[in-house]
């Protein structure tokens, strides 16, 4: 049996606090994929470490079978 992506993200330090963690864990470990988005403001000169963390999170969730949407705009 594979590990829940919520547990993996917690172990790796992506989740420090969460409202209703039991519900989020159940949602991320469910049988149906979750669609999620992360938005980026492209008006800055460059990306930061914070952007990298968000992209890494996006990749982890996608590898777990969820559907990412990246929004880039100003």
Image (spheres, rainbow, N blue to C red):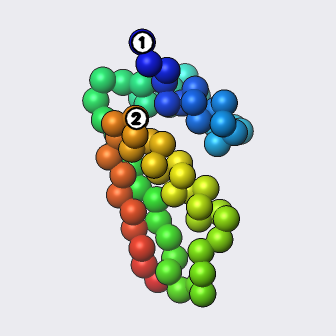
Residue 1 numbered mark, or none: 1
Q: Around disc 1, counting alpha carbons within 10 Å, would you say few (fewer than 14), some (14 to 19), or many (20 or more)?
A: few
Q: Do the residues labelled 1 and 2 touch (CB within 8 Å)?
A: no
Q: In which quarter of the image is residue 13?
A: top right
| 48 w.r.t. 57: above or below | below
Name the element at disc 1. Answer: loop
Q: Which residue is drawn at 36% across and 52% down?
A: 68
Mark 2 Cα shell of 10 Å, populated few (<14), some (14-19), many (≥20): some
- Asked if 37 appears above or below 73 in the picture, the reply is above
Q: Mark 2 points at which residue?
A: 64
Q: Where is residue 55 in the image (x, y as percent from the top left)?
A: 51, 57
* Residue positioned 54% across, 52% down in the render: 56
Which one is nearer the viewer's eye here, 19 or 73? Answer: 73
User: Which residue is depicted at the point 48% across and 24% down?
Assistant: 4
Mark closest to the chain's N terminus, 1 or 2: 1
Q: Where is residue 59 in the image (x, y as percent from the top left)?
A: 45, 49
Judged from the image, the secondary structure of the residue bearing numbered disc 2 is loop
Quarter of the figure with the N terminus: top left
Q: In this view, does 64 lie above or below 38?
A: above
Between marks 1 and 2, how big is the CA–CA gap?
13 Å
């Amino acid at each position: 049996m594979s590990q829940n992506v919520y547990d993996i993200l917690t172990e790796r330090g992506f989740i420090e606090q969460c409202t209703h963690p039991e519900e989020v864990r159940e949602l991320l470990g469910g049988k149906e994929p979750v669609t999620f988005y992360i938005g980026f403001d492209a008006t800055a000169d460059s990306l930061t470490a914070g952007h990298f963390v968000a992209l890494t999170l996006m990749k982890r969730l996608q590898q777990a079978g969820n559907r990412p949407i990246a929004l880039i705009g100003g």
